[in-house]
Image (tube, rainbow, N blue to C red):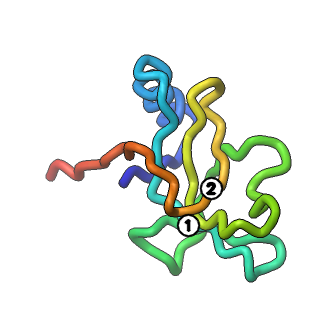
Amino acid sequence: MVEINSLDENDVLFGVVASDRKNRWLGMHVDHDQTPPLPWWMSNPNQMPQWTNFLPGESNNHEYHGETRVQMRKPTGKWNDVPCDKKLKCICEININ
């Protein structure tokens, strides 16, 4: 799944999400056992993201429902933590080299 590392990259991918009108999974996990919560890209759990775009007040593990995954929200392009059993499409990233 995609890793977003800048506002420009977020804006491009938000164009895809907004045109489809559906929230999408990102390749990010949030560890709420840490204070503050620790986000990391699933491809490299030892590396914290250099840039994030969470909604104000997120990531918050709302009502302790196991919100360990991150979605991009269709209305704003901002990110939100949600439970991993939520049914969403994802944004895939392909490395072309």
How packed mark 2 is, by other alpha carbons closer than 10 Å (few <14, some 14-19, many 20 or more), is many
Q: As drawn, is 63 to the left or to the right of 80? A: right
- Where 67 falls versus 75 (above or below)? below
Image coordinates of residue 52 in percent, x first then y, are: 64, 50
Residue furthest out toward the top: 19
* Residue 66 vertical position relative to residue 85 in the rendered view, above or below: below
Above or below, 52 relative to 47: above
Q: Name which of mark 2 and mark 1 comes first in the sequence.
A: 1
Q: Amino acid at mark 2?
A: Val
Check whether the beta carbons of the residues at disc 2 and disc 1 lie within 8 A of each other. Answer: no
- Closest to the observer: 86 or 19? 86
Q: Could you say which is closer to the camera, residue 59 or residue 4?
A: 59
User: Mark 1 highlights which residue?
Assistant: 29
Q: Choose top left, top right, bottom left or bottom right for residue 76.
A: top right
Quarter of the image with the N terminus in it: bottom left
Viewer-nearest residue: 76 or 11: 76
- Residue drawn at x 50%, y 61% is 85
Percent across and percent down for residue 83 are 59, 61
Q: In whole angstroms, how far apart are the C-alphas of marks 2 and 1?
A: 10 Å
Q: Which mark is residue 82?
A: 2
Q: Position of residue 49 (x, y in %)?
A: 58, 61
**Secondary structure beneath disc 1?**
strand
